[in-house]
Amino acid sequence: MDPTNILVQVQTYNKESLAYLENLNCFIGTLNKKFKALREGKPEGNLGDTLTFDLPPRSVANQGLIASFQPAVQRLQKLAITQSQNASMAFTAQQFAFNVKDYMEEFGKSRVEELSTQIEANIALNAISGVPVMAPNAQGQYVPTGALYTDSGPYRFYGDGINPINSFGQLAKMLAFYRNYGAPAGAPNVFLSDLAIPDIINTGANQFVPARNEKYTNSWDLGTYKGSNANFFQSNLLPIQNAGTCGNSQQVLTVISTNDPTGANITQITVSGATPSDVNAIKSGDLAQFNDGVGSLPNLRYLTFTGHIPSGNPVQIRMLANATADGSGHVVLSIFPPLQSTFGNTQNLNTPIQAGMQLSVLPSHRAGVIVGGNAAFLGMPQLPDETPYPTGNAVNKATGATLRTYYGSIFGQNTRGIINDCVWNATFVPEYCMRIIFPL
């Protein structure tokens, strides 16, 4: 068979595969993939590359007419391309010669669907900040380091992990809390559990707008409902946050102290109330909320992200690391975001944290997510051609999604092979997100 024809077939097949990759999964299909390098027409990259994008700078207004100059601080979010997957298939020359169409379309479709599902599930881990940090080993292979990314994913949430989210009213309240804190203009994307959709639709006369019936059906696209100004999607790949004992046992934790008594940069809180000597007290990714009505102590509220005005949002935090309780049931919580009650452009509390305040940790749950302002970024650079093998690179320049397919044979043996592969990573800007809590 003419190698030129093989190359053409690989290129054509790869374009079909890219459509499967994008349109079978809501995160891959909708995340922001328009990086500067792609806009400049330079999409090629490889494992280990780092992409950078700007975040809006923060400021604070001062009373009076006397200026208090603030430093100009550029806010950046970096995305290291460290995730990779491949799907391959081997066949004989006879199979290739007489069954090209079947192998390229039917077997290839199944292979790419499996590949895309693995990628989609990995991207969805950003809803719980559970994406593994990868690094090259001595052989240059990227392997998990045991750490998780901490600068991605939401710290605010809606739902308690006990009562189901099953109505339009709850969705409306969720969106109200999301916007009350401060949200970018435009309709946010809301990723819901597919198992919750029937009950939600059943609660009202309004129905989700059906998805368009195109060649590759976006089966995850629910549309919107009247008055929501939000785009809703469903997924069966939402991640599970396996909580520690404090959450699953509904233990009320009481603040003892913080790492910064001045309130300028609180990143650790020491609490009591956990099971003594419990090694599973807190799990990385656990969420907690400060409780209202604790004695005569004031209720904690977040300030709006822009404007620094007290919002209606209770203070919610995410745990950055596993934590063990000591023999007295004390636990040191490493938290995100840093909490600040002192005046400044990163102030986010309406009142200082005091000893005696209480907080509750969520139990194990399935995590959906709401994201506004196209602030969920997916980097999928085009891999280089796999010389000397015939290679096809399908690149959607409008979105940046890419997929590589290459073909080759083992010299002197009746074995041919086709490989699909791609590299990627994703990050969700924390302040533009909110986790949606679905009970298990």
Image (tube, grey):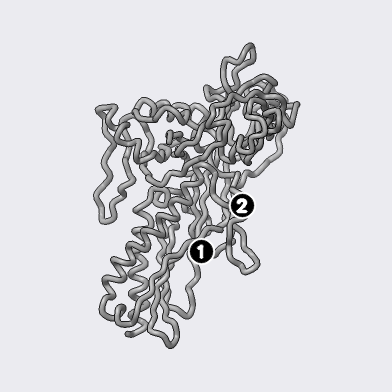
Disc 1 crowd rating (10 Å Cα; few below 14, some 14-19, many 20+) is few
The N terminus: image quadrant = bottom left
Q: Is residue 278 left or right of residue 5?
A: right
The 10 Å Cα crowd at callout 2, few under 14, some 14 to 19, many 20 or more, is few
Up/down of 190 relative to 123, above or below? above
Disc number placed over residue 302 in the picture, else none = none
Question: In this rendering, would 415 be left or right of 316?
Answer: left
Which picture quadrant has residue 402?
A: bottom left
Residue 277 in the image: x percent, y percent?
Answer: 67, 34
Q: Residue most toward the bottom? A: 412
Residue 42: mark: 1
* Residue located at (62% from left, 25% from top): 253
Give the Cα separation between the discs numbered 1 and 2: 32 Å
Q: Secondary structure at mark 1?
A: loop
Residue type at the position of mark 2 = Gly
Which amino acid type corresponds to the residue marked 1 in the rendered image?
Answer: Lys
For marks 1 and 2, the one nearer the N-term is 1
Q: Residue at x 38, y 59 (%)?
A: 114
From the image, tell me which residue sits under label 2.
146
